[in-house]
Every structure is written in C-alpha cells, then in structure tokens.
Image (cartoon, rainbow, N blue to C red):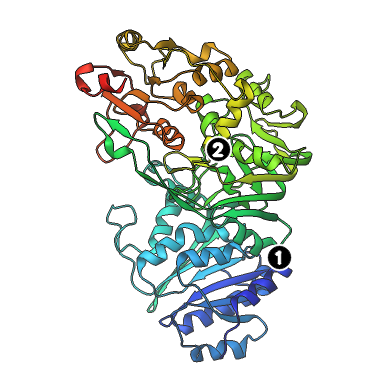
Amino acid sequence: MPSRNLGIVAGSLRKNPEAPWALMLVDNDTDVKRVMTKVREWLAGRSGIGMAESKLRSAEILVQLADSSDDFARWEALEEEYSSSFVLTRGFKSVRSLHGYLSSVPRPVAIADFTSAEAVFKRRLAKNAPFYVRDGGIYLVDEPEPIKADDGSGCTGEIGGTLALLQAYGSRFPGSDEHSHRDSIALGAAFCGLESRRDALGEEISLLRQGDYQRKLRDRDATELLNARYGAAWGKELSKRPGHEFRVTSKVTTNRNAQRFPQRFKVPEISVRAYEAATCCEGQVAVLEEFILPDSFRRPYQNRLQNRNLKESSPDFVEAVSIAGAQRVPGEYFYIDTEYPDHFGHVTTEVFARLAHFVSLRRELPELGVVISTKKATGLPGWLSEILDILEVPSGRRAIVRAGQPLRCDVLYAATPLMSQPQWIDPGMSEFWQELKERVVGPGVELQRPVFSTRAPRGERTCLNTSVVEELFESRGYEILLPETLSFAEQVRRFASAPAVAGFGGSNLFQMMFAPAGPRCVVAGDSYTAVNEYMIAAAGGNPIHYSFHNSEIVHPENGWSWAAFLSNFTFDIDNDPMLNAAI
C-alpha cells in the first residue's frame, strides 16, 4: 500500500480549512484492531464523550505512520473499508517535526496517539498536542501497557502520557499545587470531559477539549511555518542575515563571578519580516491569526518563550489573546514594543535593539511609523517621546497601544533584535548608538570629567553605604551624576564627554553606550546577575571592571530568585583589591 506525501495532504487540508479531519499516530507495533475499532466508532459518530456526531462522521482520517516504520501492508484492510475517509502517510521523525506539521494545517477535530512509543515520548507529545485540537474536539491516548501508579514525582520517570493527562484533568479541582504543576493545571483546564476504557489490550482514554489557544512562534521557525500555513497571505520575509559568532576583544576584569561574562556571543539569524494585518496588544504581544508572533518575546531564543502578559498553557501554547475591538491603523509601522512599557532600562536595551532596524528600514520607507505600548494615560513618558523626537519620528506616526485597546496594522514590520540579554549582542548595535549620539551632539565632543552614575535609594539593588562609594570616586576626579535629573539629550551630551564611566549596576549606567572609547566600571551586589553593561562595553570594544560586593539576599544554590536579584548590598573596598587600579 503506497503512502501519500504529507505535503500533498497538508495542501489539501489548507484548501478547505473548515472541513473536519482527524489525526491518528501509529507505528509498527500499533494494534491494528484497536485502530480499526476506533475508526469505525468515529465515522459512525460515536466519540463517547459528547462531541457532535456530524464532526467525526464526516471527517477525513489521516493516519501517520512513524518515519521509522515500514509495515504498510497490514493497514490495507482499513484502506479497502474506508477508502473515501482514510489516508495513510509516512509521518513524524520527532515530536518537534510533528508540531511543525500540525502548525502548518487547520486544526483537527481529533488527535489519537496509538503509538507504542516509550512513556517519555507520549508524555512530551501530550504537553502540546492537545492544544492543536479544535474547541469541542477529542484528544485520545492509547496505553498498550498497564498504567503505573503515581510515584509523587510529578509525571516523571516511567509514568506514561495517559496518567499525565489524568493527573492534569484532576488538577482542575481544589488542592493542586499551582507552582510545581502549572503546565498540568493549564492542560487540565483545556478539558471538560473524560472517558476511559480498559481491556485485555491496554487502556484508552479520550478527553474532550475546550477553549481557544494560540501557538507561540519561534523566530527561527516563523517564516517557514507561516508560509506553510497561509502561503503569501501572511506577509513576507524581507531579509535574513546568517547567524555568526561575536568574539569579545575588550578586556573584562572582576573581583568575582567571572563565569558570568562569556568571551563569545552566538548571534542568531537576523530576520526582517512584514506582516499583513497583525494585531498589537499592550506589553509586546503581537498576534496573527492562530499564532503569537516571535516579536512578542524579549528573549526569542530561550528554551521556553515567555511574556508576562500572556497566560501560559504549555511550553508552546497560551490562552488565546482577545483582540476584540481592535482599531485599524492604516499604513506601515515598525514594531518596537517592550514587555515592560515605560521602563528606561528595557527601552534602552530591548527597544533600542529593534530601533536599530527601524532606522535602517526607514531609509527605504520614509513614512514608516512605530508601534509601542504605554501604561500612562497621558501618553509616552517624556524621555521616550524625546528619543523618538531625536530620531525624527513624527507624533502622528507613533501608534500607541494601551490596555484593552489593541491595534491592527495594515503592515507591521518587525525584526530579530540585535541584542537579547544575556544571550547575545550584535556589534552593529554600536552603529545605532553612534547615530543617536551624533543626532544630539554632532560629530565632535569636548571631553570633561569622568562620570560616576549613581542611583537614588529605592529599596531595590540599593547600595546601603552609597556615600562611601561616591566619596571614593569623587576623590578620583569623577563627577557624581544622577541621570534621571537630566533630560535624555542632556544625558547623551554628558556621557558623550566622559573619558571614563563608572556607576552602580543598572539602567542608570546604560548611557555608557554614548561615551567615547575608555574604561567602564560597575559596582554591584553579587546577586545582580544582569550583564547589560558588559554587553554594551563588548559591542563598543571598551574595557570594563565589575566590582561585586555582598548582597543581603543570595540566590538559591543552582537557582535564581527575584528577591535576591533586587536585594540591597553593602560596598566594602577590601572585597575588591583591583578596584583602585580599575578607576
């Protein structure tokens, strides 16, 4: 029995996206009788858990045989009996390839996992696959072996996919540990009905899906998946620059925590895309049909894509984002939004990493506007408006996203950021910093005293003996500067004239990007793990010294915590014998 090409099948499904279809996953060891029984039940409209009979009765059933399987002959009986409704294809090589396929076609009304694969495979599949099923559809798992009892490890070891699903369904009820089982809780909430059957051949469980979900798109997969799912209708990729390795040539010294400062950054492929009719929601959430666009994530290459403004359901899915009442924004706009609106540090790193693309693209599209969020009722913060003024973005070309007021852009341009802390920085960022600086101060600046950038006490990452540090640096000729008391342009001018820059770790020191070549120095607590200052110094080719001191709260062993990251610290010159030489 010859198999049909998966691509041909996918193309057929996309031509009629509303037509019902179901997916069955099988392999060489799958029991054919169990599959035949289920096919007959589905085509007769007997799902067992309340699905409308017409959906399955009229569905085309696609059976994917594992890529390593070669036994097509034993499926001939199904082809003969259900030739009009049964299609056999050679299918998945891995869970990832299966997810890629399911992302490229309309949602099925049912997915059935009849593989005899090991428990780890079935469990990994169950983490995401149910969310591809349409609202009101079925996710079925067949366990050829008896289900083992829960050993209290949270669905690890040899516990199978069925048990994981059962535990997830049960977790919808009071008493669940929401922190340790957040994915199980979300998965359980995706089901509203359950039927379990056991016989001599094993156990079969069917779960009734409820709710709408959207898949998180990874930057490296976005163009391929969007092309596969929507053809040219979604938009297009304008350019793709190959990834490369950035080797840091500037010197870094530190009294401790040297392992935090890599000598190489792996810069990923840099893609520029234009989306047709994408919708933007507050806090860096960009939606296109069934997908959350990759530009919604400040760290687009981390293992699990996250945005605090999305409600996680699984490693790859979130609850569908409401775009009701989205207002159309005619024209072409570039996406520069941030998950943390109105925050100076996130703007001068994450937003700048996208604005660098905007400046370049605007040379070809002079009317290009920008899209960004704010939480302020009065509009963008003054310093952010000032930055856009410096870049000559007209006020009428600034599309402002607010809570509950999504915007749908005719054309939304977006690009892989040139910086994503702590994973990479492209040295090309320095070209953008230079252009922004020259727009403020011109090509030449007269040097003044070095700058020590201090922080106002806020109870977060505060140096508990700030005056001691300031007195030390002032005695070495540094001007003590509180940047927030200056306009953005004044900050650029002052740092542009500083032959050396030092300060407490944090966004108050990011303006070092505008300083001329020279030494940099960061004073911080041990629990301050961000490396923005190092990345900025590396891109500019400047030496940098980190002076670490004891934080009030330390990170847990082999872990990390917000409380520690934000904790105060006490400066002690004896902790850093290298500091005097560094400044």
Q: Nearer the viewer, mark 2 or mark 1?
A: 2
Instruction: Look at the image and tell me in which quarter the C terminus lies.
Output: top left
Residue at mark 2 = 353
Q: Residue at x 46, y 86 (%)?
A: 70
Please state the horizontal and vertical placement of residue 553, each as a whole percent of the image.
28, 25
Looking at the image, residue 150 sits to the left or right of residue 55; the answer is left
Residue at mark 1 = 17
Return the residue found at the far right. 330
Dot 1 crowding, Cα within 10 Å, few <14, some 14–19, many 20+: few
In the foreground, 273 or 182: 273
Please state the horizontal and vertical placement of residue 541, each as a whole percent of the image.
42, 35
In the foreground, 150 or 247: 247
Q: Residue at x 49, y 19 (%)?
A: 495
Dot 2 crowding, Cα within 10 Å, few <14, some 14–19, many 20+: many
Q: Which SS class for mark 2?
A: helix
**Can the viewer see residue 528 in this picture?**
no
How far apart in space, not on screen, are marks 2 and 1 (Cα)? 38 Å
Q: Which SS class for mark 1?
A: loop
- Name the image quarter holding residue 197: bottom left
Looking at the image, residue 127 sits to the left or right of residue 49; the answer is left
* Image disc number at residue 367: none
Please state the horizontal and vertical placement of residue 301, each as a whole percent of the image.
47, 49
